[in-house]
Amino acid sequence: MANELGYRTARDLFLACPAIARDMKSPAAAQPPLEFCRTLLSGRVPEEAVTFCAYLLPERAAVWWGHECLSNVAELLAERDLELLALVTDWVGEPSNPRHRAALSSAVDPSSTTPAAWIALSAAWRDPTFDMLSTGFPAAHAVNAGILAGLARVATADRFGVLSAFVEMGIQMVEMEAQRQSVDAY
């Protein structure tokens, strides 16, 4: 797809969202975004492909992607993380529902660094109670942290395979979002 979510190149995303450069060390390239993402995956620091996807996806889709990644390693998560993922499921389904927002906001602990706590925080990012917008980082920062924290729990021998599956899932979500946006434009 030549125009993933409005960005013709990876460099366009870096220009639109400068915070990505604080989470990634790889320089932006003039490649199409998904080609750049695959290059990152096969590069020296393949985890940066996760970071790039987190920033490339629209916020709600990125939160869902993070949820889905962690759901695929649920056996490695604590019970509290599974509870947070259930709240994220409700929020993604109806992000403007005050009941879901309140449940998520009351459950999120910004000082917690578990995988699902990061994903829940990314869903509650705009809640003024947490003042996360003042950090200068978008919710993608928390999605990235949550996915990478979950990935860190995977056995070393399996890690690259799981990482690749997460990135491919992210790429598929980018393609679906781009298609949805193109249909919505008509």
Image (spheres, helix red, strand yellow):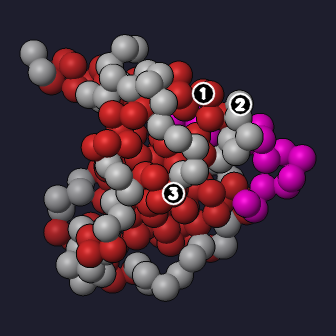
Q: Main secondary structure of the magenta part?
A: helix
Q: Residue reaching furthest left?
A: 186
* Residue at 89% in and 47% down: 157
Do callouts 2 and 3 mark residues in contact (Cβ within 8 Å)? no
Mark 2 or mark 3, which has the lower sequence index? 3
For disc 3, the neighbor class at 10 Å (few under 14, some 14 to 19, many from 20) is some
In this view, the residue in front, 18 or 172, is: 18
Q: Which residue is mark 1?
A: 38
* Element assignment for label 1: helix
**Label whose residue precedes the other's in the sequence (1 or 3):** 3
- Look at discs 1 and 3 and give the one toward the viewer: 3
Mark 2: which amino acid?
Ser
> In the rendered structure, are the residues bearing label 1 and label 2 in contact, judged by CB atoms less than 8 Å apart?
yes
Magenta segment: 152-173
Mark 1–mark 3 distance (CA, rounded to whole Å): 17 Å
Which residue sits furthest right? 157
Q: Which residue is mark 2?
A: 42
Residue 43, position as x, y percentages in the image:
70, 34
Element assignment for label 3 = helix
- What residue is pinned by disc 3? 23
> Which amino acid, mark 3?
Asp
Residue at mark 1 to residue at mark 2: CA–CA distance: 6 Å
Residue at left 43%, top 52%?
Answer: 20
Q: Is residue 63 magenta?
A: no
Which element carries disc 2, helix, strand or loop?
Answer: loop
